[in-house]
Image: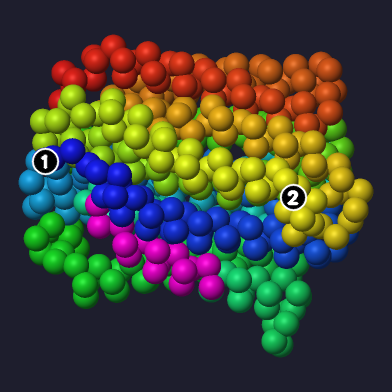
Amino acid sequence: MRRFSNREILKITFPVLVSLLMEQLIGLTDTIYLGHYGDGRTELGASALAGVFYLVVFMLGFGFSIGAQVLIARRNGEGRHSEIGPVFMQGTAFLLVLAGLLFTLSQCFARDLFALMIESEAVRAAADSYLEYRVYGFFFSFVAAMFRAFYVGTTRTRILTANSVVMVLTNVVLNYLLIFGKGGFPELGIAGAAIASSISEAVSVLFFVGYTYWRVDWRRYRLFRFGGIDFPQLGRILRVSVWIMVQEGMAFLSWFIFFVCIEHLGELELAVTNMVRSISSVVFLFVNAFASTASSLVSNLIGAGRSAAVMPLCRRMTGLCYAFVIPVSLLIALFPEQALSLYSDRPEQVAAGVPSLWVMLSTFILCVPAFVLQFSVSGTGNTRMTLVIVMAAILFYVAYTLYLTFGLQADVAVCWTTDHLYYGVTLLLAWLYLRSGRWRRRVI
């Protein structure tokens, strides 16, 4: 396998980027619609807390799919295509069982958790209403994550764009109909946003299944053949995936803790944080796309015996990512009121969000190289080391968050500096590990 050119990297990354952009529009449209529904603050705050709780649970399944993606990419690089399908099928079966377990636990205990952690009764009731329907999305989003792992791992990413467009269009239409009660549908408010998101994920899975069956040589990969649980195969996937599952779950749990801490500062601060988080997620999708591609290409390179090309690839991935992130961040920084006004028509809420928005945008200076290197560590197959890196960053992040919110009761803009610390620790530790070269001897 020859060296990946910048054009080849962009050709692989662009469909991932567009798919992530389309999927981000689901959360974006939810936030925009809810920001103009009711009093704005309650719905925005509740969707932030319930949405991040959903992400904490979802990232357990997504982390498993990333581990499966590493194996799929390695087998693809080795030319062992017939071994890709069994990884996909065993992973899908495992995730469906996991989705059932997490769905049951969420239904039983999520409300009690919210009652303990959320002070505002109005926000808590709205969050309960959102989560009641959103948890059905676990089954669909987990299966969709495995399809993405297959397509990214085999570098056949073009389909991700079309799938995401279909999913987003479904969500936008259903949000309008169900939140505001248009077209003869009942006015469901925040519950309508949750129902729309879950149905959109179901449509995404149906699209993936149909496209894969009719347009992919699935017999070559031995897809859609399931003869029961293959425990040795599942064990190989879990040896890579379990550390990413814990890593991703803990990373988003720390984010959930951040939002809970902000909620104790006030409903306005929580609404501002949700607006800034939504804009942050739009910029972050560029980072996520390039980092995900880096993980897959690193695994492909190692599988093809090109370990020496890994570090140069990481540097080029970082530079290419900056080429997209910096212009977008500068554009938002120059027009902060216009960006925030998408989420609220209340001048005091928009004005309160500007300082936080500027602080958040500055974090991407560290975020870009930190995530490219972190995902590259996962691509080497040493996902346990990735967990160590993330856990170290989380410890600093949570401690600093608690100090700022409960100790200093700092302004919400100051609280966003926690991201600088998180990305700084991640960048340093990931760079030290990759520079050491110990990953060259690892076999998966």
Say few, some or many: other residues with alpha carbon within 10 Å of mark 2 (under 14 / 14 to 19 / 20 or more).
few
Residue 149 coordinates in the image, percent (x, y): 31, 50
Residue identifier under label 1: 1
Disc number for residue 335:
2
Camera-nearest residue between 367 and 121: 367
Q: Earlier in the sequence, mark 2 or mark 1?
A: 1
User: Which segment did they paint magenta?
Assistant: 155-169
Q: Is residue 34 left or right of residue 243?
A: right
Residue 4 is inside the magenta segment: no
**Residue at position x 41%, y 35% in the image:** 319
Residue 403 coordinates in the image, percent (x, y): 75, 17
Q: Quadrant of residue 263?
A: top right
Residue 159 is inside the magenta segment: yes
Q: How many marks?
A: 2
Magenta segment, principal secondary structure?
helix
Residue 334 coordinates in the image, percent (x, y): 72, 46
**Residue at position x 64%, y 43% in the image:** 330
Residue 171 coordinates in the image, percent (x, y): 57, 69
Q: Looking at numbered disc 1 in the image, what kind of residue is underneath it?
A: Met
Q: Is residue 142 visible?
A: yes
Camera-nearest residue between 304 and 179: 304
Q: Quadrant of the N terminus?
A: top left
